[in-house]
Amino acid sequence: MRALLKRAADRLHAIEDRLTVRTQIAAAVAALSIVLVGTLAAGAALVSYRHTAALIESNLAGIASTTSARLDRFMATRQQEMKLFAELQPMQRLWQGNPAELRSALEALQHSFDFTWIGFADLDGNVVASTGGLLQGKSVAARPWFKQGLERIAVGDVHEAMLLASLLTQRANNEPYRFVDIAVPVRDASGKLLGVLGSHLDWNWASNLIKDVEANDGDTDTQLSILSKGGVVLVGPQKETTRYAGEDLSGILNARDGTFRETADGRQLLTAFHVGRGYRDYQGLNWIVTASQPASVALAAAISSAQMIMAIGAVTALIALSLAVLLARRIAGPIIAITQEADRIGRAHGPTMLARQSGSAEVVQLSRALRSLLRRIGLAEERTKEAELRATENAMQLQEDMLKLRQLADTDFMTGLMNRRSFLAVADDAVAFCRRYKRNMATLMIDIDHFKKINDTHGHAAGDDAIKRVAEIVNQSIRTTDKAARFGGEEFVVLLREIDQETAILLADRIRASIESATVRHGDTVIPLTVSVGLALFDEGDRDVQDVIERADQGLYVAKKTGRNRTFLMPAEDERAARAA
């Protein structure tokens, strides 16, 4: 394979060597123009297609959302009408009064609004009065709307009511009656439950709503459907069949609205959906409204726009190809001339200066470069020296950077204090000095009280602010000869040189008091802050600085256990006794 590629490359180079500059420029410019124009045209076509498709999807989504909102508002209005009627003051005397008067009132309500049947059932489920006398005297105790209506305002999903349908006039198209139930508990003035006011809405109003929307879709062949929350088609093509189930249905119910593409009856459809969210007091039944268009119709404008852009791109590419040939002839002229001049200089004796050429910035630059070639040779040595000088400067800069890095390695990044490694190195030297020259030295171990509570209550950023504030106070409280370090977390260590016990105690307590009285703010929150301090003095019996630090840590432990926010001096005798034991 490698040999085949090499042969192909050699052949290509051989072809290039036989082509003139003008031909190569023309071919390169033409190829570049075609690629750029083609890419731009394809990109513009893709953007146009996606933009148009997005507008169509948005329009479908708007239709589905608007239709869903109209459904919810209609149901909310009917529910509110039933509720207001049940609470009307003039109706209080009729619920347990003359059934004939109650029936007249119910029929007046039916004529005013779009109810197929309205009836009042007592607590036993017997229909006391109803519109048209339908089901009057019958028991509806087993009906779901009655059971739910005894407890609350209830709205039942679409269903067939066989008994009521048998009493109504048969429709011309022989379609069965389907209803939506609304039930409202009826109470007297004292709040006592008297029965249930129930109504049946003819589901045909939803079909009329869908037909109205489809008739005003602007000839886009939009089909609307209403589905139950179980995915069953209530209105629309393939009525009473399950259109979505399983993960598809769960995805629709969870997303509440959106668009997708699907295949139905062998056709690609662009479908938008919206799940009803209810309206005001009406909680909704999670009806799913879908608006679908054939993809061929919905995306026709997008495809046409993309094709037009591609056609314009093709014409532009042809024009670019013609211009490339003309430009190549113009551009190649000066290059051919300068090539011939360079060949003359290589063969001739005498003047070796190249004649100036023009025609483009590159040709002028090339002419100048060749003319100054001999002069540049004389400057080569000087530039070499300059390069050596720059290398020396870079080495010095590198050394300075290394010093800065070493300083960063010895410093705690958060507080600017020494870290554990650099502190222990300094402390070891201090112990050796104290042992050799019989000098005093003390170590403080400082720990923030209830630090975990600060983090849990105010967050880790607040904990960081507390650590920085403690470090600032400690650093300001000690001498330049003393050293302070953060050992990790909320724990600090201070090395005090040339100090006696009394002064060390006073200094430790001053640091503790300063921290207690300091203000630590995180945002608008003021965080109370205290520390516990363990103190240890260097003793001849200490093996190294670790013994002093460990004793200070034991003092810190005692300070924590005996109430916190205090300083405790741990004597050397106690530690030696512990080690001996």
Image (tube, rainbow, N blue to C red):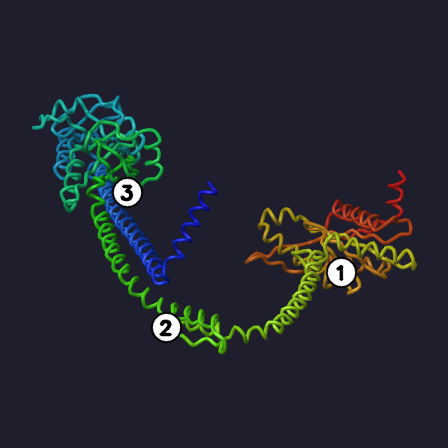
Label 2 and label 1: CA atoms lie apart by 83 Å
Picture quadrant of residue 237 = top left
Labelled pair 3, 1 in contact (Cβ < 8 Å):
no
| Foreground of the two, 196 or 255 | 255
Mark toward the start of the polypeptide (3 vs 2): 3
Picture quadrant of residue 242 = top left
Q: Residue 201: image x %, image y %? A: 18, 33
Q: Residue 386: image x %, image y %? A: 63, 72
Q: Residues within 10 Å of mark 1 (few under 14, many from 20)?
A: some
Q: Quadrant of the C terminus?
A: top right
For the residue marked with disc 2, what is the amino acid?
Answer: Gly
Q: Residue 510 — which label? A: 1
Mark toward the start of the polypeptide (2 vs 1): 2
Q: Residues within 10 Å of mark 2 (few under 14, many from 20)?
A: few
Q: Tell me: residue 576, above or below residue 123.
A: below
Residue receiving disc 3: 279
Residue at x 47%, y 71% (from the top left corner): 347
| Foreground of the two, 385 or 122 | 385
Q: Residue furthest bottom?
A: 351
